[in-house]
Image (cartoon, rainbow, N blue to C red):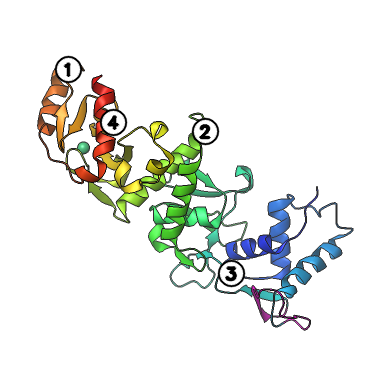
Amino acid sequence: MEYVVNTDDIREVLGEMGGKASVAEIRRKLLEIFTGGEVPSNYSSFITFRATVQRKIENHCPEADDYDGSKSAYFRRVGYGEYELMNKDKTITYTPVGKSTPQTPHRFPKYDNKFVVSESKFDDDYILVDSLDELSAFIEAGYSVRMSTGDSNAPPSLIVSKSLKVDGGKSPEKSLRDELKRLAEEELDSTITTTSRKEQILLRGHLLDKKDSAPCHICGEVFPADLLVAAHLKSRSKCQPKEKLDFDNVAKLMCKFGCDDLYEKGYIFVQEGEVRRNPKRTSTRHMRTYISLLEGRKIEGWLESEKYYNWHHKKVTS
Ligand SMILES: [Zn+2]
C-alpha cells in the first residue's frame, strides 16, 4: 500500500495523541491509520520510513540543528526523540482525577479508523466522525466521545462532553458553526442518512446553546435535549442556499411529544405569530384535545421567521 508521509498528517495524529509523543509512537500511529500497520510500499524499508517521519518533524522544529526558519514552526522538541505540538493545533483530552495519563479520542479500526461520538451508551446511537474539528463540533453539541489511553488492554471509555478539554485550533463553538455551514451547503441526498443525521444533531446543539434542556417552540413545555429536535420551519430541500444558513430562524427546537410531527405533517401551522389548527387535515379526538391546548399560543421570534412559517402555511393548506 502506498502512503506519502506529510506534515499535516503528523500534526493531526500528534493532536489525537494529546499533543505530545515520541517519533516511535507517531510513526506507529501513522501506519495504523493510513496503511493498517504495514510499511508503505513506496519506502524501501521501515528505517527509511521512520527517518522520513523524523525529518518532516525536524523541518518544522526550531530546536532541530538544521532548522532554517523558512518553514513554519509546528513542533517543539521536549525530550530525546519526543515532540510536542505548538499551541495552534487542536488537542482533545480527558485526564481522570488522580491519574496522570490523559485519554485521547480513539480511532476504531473496525469503523474505518473513525472516531465515535454518542448521545448514549448504546451502539445504535453511535455516530462516526473523521476529524478533530468535526469531533469538537459534536462535543459543543453535548455529545460524548470514546476516549482511550492508547493501551490496547483497556477498552476505550465513553466520556461526557463536559469532562473533555479542547485546546488550540478552532474553538468548539467555531467548529460547530463551520460544520453546520459545510453540511448546509451539501446537496443532501435523502439516502445519505448519516450526513442529515449529523446536520440535525449539530443544528439542535446550536439551538440548545450548551443547555441540557429547553422549551419546545410550539407548546412551550421544557424537555431534555434528547426529546427535542431541530425542526425546519420551511423544508430543508426547498430552502435557498442563503436560507439554509439562517440557522437561528429557519429551524426551531420542537418536542418529540407531538409538536414536531404535528407541524411537519401539517396538522398545525403558525399564522400571524400564533399556532393554528389546520382545518384541512382530519384528526382524531385525542389529537383535537391536544391541538386545542396549542391553539392561539403566541410563539417567539415570529418576525424573523415569518417567511418560513408562511411557506409552510401555504404548503399545508393549499
Ligand atoms: Zn411541544
Q: Earlier in the sequence, mark 4 or mark 2?
A: 2
Q: Position of residue 268 (x, y in %)?
A: 20, 27
User: How many C-alpha atoms fall within 10 Å of the one at disc 2: few (<14), some, or many (≥20)?
Assistant: few
Q: Does 284 appear above or below 219?
A: above
- Residue labelled with disc 1: 284
Q: Position of residue 187 (x, y in %)?
A: 51, 36
- Going by the numbered disc 4, the residue's amino acid type is Trp
Q: Which residue is at the front of the view, 158 or 302?
A: 302
Q: Nearer the viewer, mark 4 or mark 2?
A: 4
Question: How far is disc 3 from disc 1 in space, using C-alphas?
Answer: 59 Å
For the residues labelled 3 and 1, say whether their Cβ atoms are less than 8 Å apart.
Answer: no
Q: Nearer the viewer, mark 1 or mark 2?
A: 2
Badge 2 marks a residue whose secondary structure is loop
Question: How far is disc 4 from disc 1 in space, using C-alphas?
Answer: 26 Å
- Residue labelled with disc 2: 192
Q: Earlier in the sequence, mark 4 or mark 3?
A: 3
Give the residue displayed 75% in from the left and 69% down from the top.
56
Question: How far is disc 4 from disc 2 in space, using C-alphas?
Answer: 26 Å
Badge 1 marks a residue whose secondary structure is loop
